[in-house]
Image (cartoon, rainbow, N blue to C red):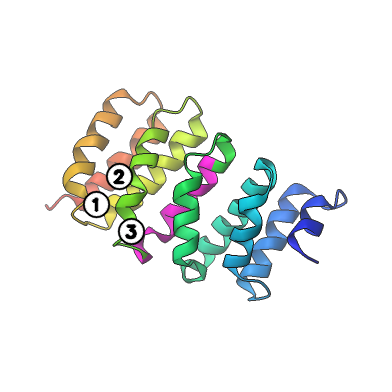
Amino acid sequence: MDFSDILNDKSIKPKERTGMISDLLSNGKTTVDSLIRFAGQAKPPDKATCIEALEHATKANAAVASPLVFDFTVTSLADKAPRVKWESARVIGNIAHLFPEKVSESIPNLLENTEHPGTVVRWSAAFALGEILKMKTLVNQELVPAVEVIISREEKNSIRKIYSDALKKITVK
């Protein structure tokens, strides 16, 4: 069964589709690169499902990610579809530590998503930025002040808490 078959089979529930694709990745029955190639041509709902499957797979084992996954999700942060934005941010949060030399490429799109009207998009951007902050790289010189501004304007306590927790973990006591 290929990605198209899974996504178009109406007898399979949406969460099951995500799980099936994630299992294919985790079990080595398909590659992340082939999923990225498919998702790049897919309609936004199918693209989001593919990225969600990547999110599940990278949460269980970040090592399944490749540089292509990182680049694809960074680009997908700018997609029009909110679900594509938030799933991409979650993948980046899961795998940023594997690509410290590339992590700065994700920051402009993540910062832009912190101003999105959708709470889930902002929460997911906060998760990814928090994970990047915890890496304690040179990008923190510019990222910490930006995050402090975001905290001051963010209306949701749950999102502010993600940033605050990350800042606490990088502060030397």
Residue occupying the point 38% across, 41% down:
110
Q: CA distance from mark 1 to mark 3?
A: 22 Å
Name the one closer to the observer, 20 or 50: 50
Which class describes the residues within 10 Å of circle 1: few (<14), some (14-19), or many (20+)?
A: some
Q: In the image, is residue 111 part of the stretch drawn in magenta?
A: no
For the residue marked with disc 2, what is the amino acid? Asp
For the residue marked with disc 1, what is the amino acid? Lys
Name the one closer to the observer, 89 or 163: 89
Mark 1–mark 2 CB contact (< 8 Å): yes
> x, y percentage for residue 5?
81, 58
Position above or below: 140 against 119: below
Residue occupying the point 38% across, 34% down:
112
Q: CA distance from mark 1 to mark 2?
A: 6 Å
What residue occupies the far bottom of the structure in this picture? 28
Quarter of the image with the N terminus in it: bottom right
Q: Which residue is label 3 attached to? A: 102
Residue occupying the point 62% across, 46% down:
48
Q: Which residue is label 2 attached to? A: 165
Which mark, residue 169?
Answer: 1
- Quarter assignment of residue 154: top left
> x, y percentage for residue 84?
57, 42
For the magenta stretch, what is the residue range?
85-98
Front: mark 1 or 3:
3
What residue occupies the far left of the structure in this picture? 173
